[in-house]
Image (spheres, rainbow, N blue to C red):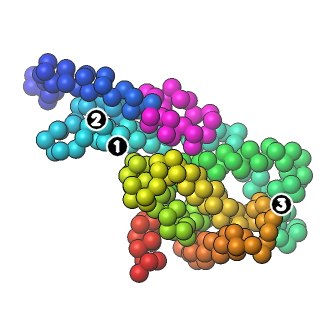
């Protein structure tokens, strides 16, 4: 009986084993890189296993004659394996998803009753829970949104990332709208912050490469990434949950005016029809169109 199993020579096997042994540090680097941005319930052991699988795949398929350094090639495979692992699991625990739906329902009821978007404290009172409980839910939901945003570097389309666990049409539309605001928040970022976000999350460029392009240190790029994510969250909140945006200590100051301009740019980035659509343009294409 014929078989299609490819035989691996002992020399090739030894080369693969050596590549894995010599680059085990990339596994911890890849896991550490993503662990701080995913919900706390995600098992670090599962992430390590996924990263190890990516490293092994990289060693098995590496072709040095292509002129690509192995560590660079391996990091691409490791990140891809980690994202596959994360996409194959729910981004939030069942309890968080349940509480988020209850929170949305209570907020909708209050909006109808009050004629405006309720504050987080008012929603918490309606649900008879402490505001700190809802703040934690909002934080977990935001982490999940960022996680799905990172997955765009592989899948490329927001609509493909929608939860597949029987969400209602209302939940799906709300989720699409939130993710569309996230894309608008990326496009509206100041140029240097946008370069960091797009380069790091969408193009998978090493932080040192981005630092060299911007003429700053790698640690400064890390700070800019955190600054960008914080600004994006505030920009989304300004449209979706205005009461969640903290008041500026100097409302008429330069920083407050710049933030207000950014919030307005996020709000006007797309129309409602575009935001609820299942498909969207890649972020690089939208940035290019905006700059034209």
Residue at position x 50%, y 68% from top? 191
- Residue 236, magenta (yes or no): no
Contact? badges 3 and 2 (CB < 8 Å): no
Quadrant of the snapshot with the N terminus: top left
Q: Are marks 1 and 2 in contact (CB under 8 Å)?
A: yes
Task: Give the quarter of the image for residue 227.
Answer: bottom right
Q: Residue at 82%, 45% (x, y): give it.
A: 132
Judge the density around disc 1: few (<14), some (14-19), many (≥20) Cα neighbours within 10 Å: some
The quadrant of the picture occupied by the C terminus is bottom left
Quarter where residue 38 is shown: top right
The earlier-in-sequence mark between 1 and 3 is 1
Q: Horizontal placement of 142 versus 186: left or right?
A: right
Q: Residues in magenta?
A: 29-49
Residue matched to label 3:
119
Q: Which residue is mark 2?
A: 58
Dot 3 falls on a residue whose secondary structure is loop
Q: What label sits on residue 76 in the rendered view?
A: 1
Q: Where residue 74 appears, x then y in whole percent?
A: 31, 37
Q: Nearer the viewer, residue 128 or 168?
A: 128
Task: In the rendered view, tell whether residue 85 sits above or below residue 22.
Answer: below
Mark toward the viewer: 1 or 3: 1
Residue 243 lies, in percent from the top left, at: 80, 63
């Amino acid at each position: 009986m014929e078989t299609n199993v490819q035989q691996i020579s002992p020399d090739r096997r030894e080369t693969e084993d050596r590549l894995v042994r010599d680059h085990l540090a990339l596994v911890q680097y890849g896991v550490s890189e993503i662990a701080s941005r995913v919900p706390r319930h995600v098992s670090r052991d599962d992430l390590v296993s996924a990263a190890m699988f990516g490293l092994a795949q990289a060693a098995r398929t590496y072709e040095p004659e292509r002129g690509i350094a192995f560590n660079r090639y391996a990091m691409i495979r490791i990140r891809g394996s980690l994202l596959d692992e994360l996409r194959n699991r729910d981004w939030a625990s069942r309890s968080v998803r349940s509480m988020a739906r209850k929170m949305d329902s209570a907020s909708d009821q209050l909006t109808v009753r009050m004629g405006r978007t309720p504050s987080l404290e008012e929603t918490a009172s309606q649900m008879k829970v402490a505001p700190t409980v809802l703040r934690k839910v909002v934080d977990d939901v935001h982490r999940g949104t960022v996680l799905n945003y990172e997955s765009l570097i592989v899948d490329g389309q927001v609509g493909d990332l929608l939860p597949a666990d029987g969400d209602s049409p209302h939940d799906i539309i709300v989720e699409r709208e939130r993710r569309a605001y996230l894309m608008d928040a990326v496009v509206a970022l100041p140029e240097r912050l946008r370069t960091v976000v797009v380069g790091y999350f969408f193009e998978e460029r090493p932080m040192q490469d981005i630092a060299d392009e911007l003429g700053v240190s790698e640690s400064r790029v890390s700070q800019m990434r955190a600054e960008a994510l914080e600004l994006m969250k505030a920009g989304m909140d300004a449209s979706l949950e205005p009461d969640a945006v903290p008041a500026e200590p100097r409302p008429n100051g330069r920083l407050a005016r710049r933030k207000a301009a950014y919030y307005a740019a996020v709000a006007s980035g797309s129309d409602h029809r575009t935001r609820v659509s299942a498909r969207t343009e890649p972020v690089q294409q939208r940035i290019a169109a905006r700059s034209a």
